[in-house]
Amino acid sequence: MSEVNEDGWPFTEWLLKADRYVEAICGLGLDDLADGPSRDCWNDGVKPKDYAIMMLEESTFGEFHLR
């Protein structure tokens, strides 16, 4: 069984969920954005949606109203 964070998310599932949020918002994926602290955020229990929004806000997409 793979390692899970405090919220019960395996890292690969958490990252895929965050990627789907990014795609739903802007049509791109996390791989299209600058690298971010995904593993640290996963370890800290950041929700996938919150990580997706954080990454978009830190990119050129931050000008959009994401919340």
Image (cartoon, grey):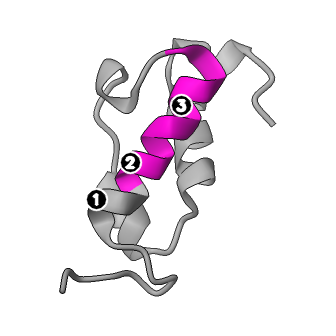
Residue count near mark 3 (Cα–Cα under 10 Å), binned few <14, some 14–19, many ≥20:
many
Residue 38: x percent and y percent?
34, 53
Mark 3 highlights which residue? Answer: 22
Three-letter residue code for mark 1? Thr
Q: Are marks 3 and 2 in contact (CB under 8 Å)?
A: no
Magenta stretch, residue numbers = 15-27
Q: Mark 1 and 2 residues: CB-CB less than 8 Å, in contact?
A: yes
Residues under numbered marks 1 and 3 in contact, where contact means CB atoms less than 8 Å apart:
no
Does the stretch in magenta take in 20?
A: yes
x, y percent for residue 43: 37, 74
Say above or below: 62 vs 46: above
Mark 3 secondary-structure assignment: helix
Residue lying furthest left:
1
Task: Let me know if residue 41 is in the magenta part.
Answer: no
Q: Quadrant of residue 66?
A: top right
Element on which disc 1 rests:
helix
Identify the disc placed on residue 16.
2
Classify 1 as above or below 11. below
Left or right of 66? Residue 33 is left
Quarter residue 11 falls in: bottom left
| Of callouts 3 and 2, the N-terminal one | 2
Pick the residue in front: 46 or 2.
Answer: 2
Q: Amino acid at mark 3?
A: Val
Residue type indicated by callout 2: Leu
Callout in the foreground (3, 2): 2
22 relative to 30 in the view: left or right: right
Label 1, on which residue? Answer: 12
Instruction: Check disc 2: other Cα within 10 Å, few if <14, some if 14-19, many if 20+.
Output: some
Q: Residue at x 53, y 55 (%)?
A: 48
Q: How many marks?
A: 3
